[in-house]
Amino acid sequence: MHDHENIRFALTDANSRQEALLNLLYQTDQKALGLVSLYFTLSIAMGSVAIAGLSDDNSIPSSLIVGFTISAMIFFVGGLFCFRAMKTQNVGFPGRGPEFWLWAIENEVAFAKAAAEYFKELDKNIRLNRQNNQDSALAMKRAKMCGAVALSAGLATALTIALF
């Protein structure tokens, strides 16, 4: 695989993989950003209803107050998972800085050797981005689970208290 055309193909292919991983990280960030605003809005609204229900002249049944409180807390935790999915992290970008190419030119490094060094660095970056994607995906999975559980847990609690 030492002919230049094959190495160029491999470089393009590997960089495409790297760009896809970065795009996946970006998409996860965008989804988490949308979800966190929804979750915190719902958490604040439900928490406000629960607090208003604690006043002396409330007309909200205590079962609903407890249900709203539980839902608000779970939405809040879901929002925290969204923040975890959006955390600032080191990422590996495709391509190399000018210092790499200056090294290759100034030392008259053969194309195949320069490509091998390029791939070593790219491999580290791809591993880093894969780990970042796995971490973000896990946090998003937990955030989505909180959204699914929040309403059903609040409703189940309110109905249980109201009926028993």
Image (cartoon, helix red, strand yellow):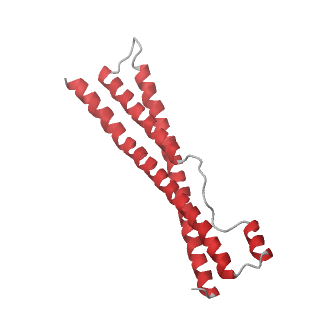
Q: Residue at x 63, y 62 (%)?
A: 93
| Front residue of this view, candidates 7 and 29 | 7
In the displayed structure, does residue 6 sit left or right of residue 164? right
Q: Quadrant of the N terminus?
A: bottom right
In the displayed structure, does residue 127 sit left or right of residue 142? right
Report the number of numbered marks. 0
Residue ranking furthest to the top: 56
Q: Residue at x 69, y 67 (%)?
A: 96
Q: Residue 133 at what x, y percent from top left? A: 50, 56
Q: Residue at x 40, y 16 (%)?
A: 54
Q: Quadrant of the C terminus?
A: top left
Q: Residue 106 at what x, y percent from top left? A: 80, 75
Q: Residue at x 35, y 18 (%)?
A: 59
The answer to which quarter of the image holds residue 6 is bottom right
| Front residue of this view, candidates 161 and 121 | 121
Residue ranking furthest to the left: 164
Q: Residue 109 at what x, y percent from top left? A: 73, 78
- Residue 151 higher or lower than 135, as above or below: above
In the displayed structure, does residue 157 sit left or right of residue 84? left
- Residue 20 higher or lower than 45, as above or below: below
- Residue 85 higher or lower than 74, as above or below: below
| Front residue of this view, candidates 161 and 126 | 126
- Residue 94 higher or lower than 110, as above or below: above
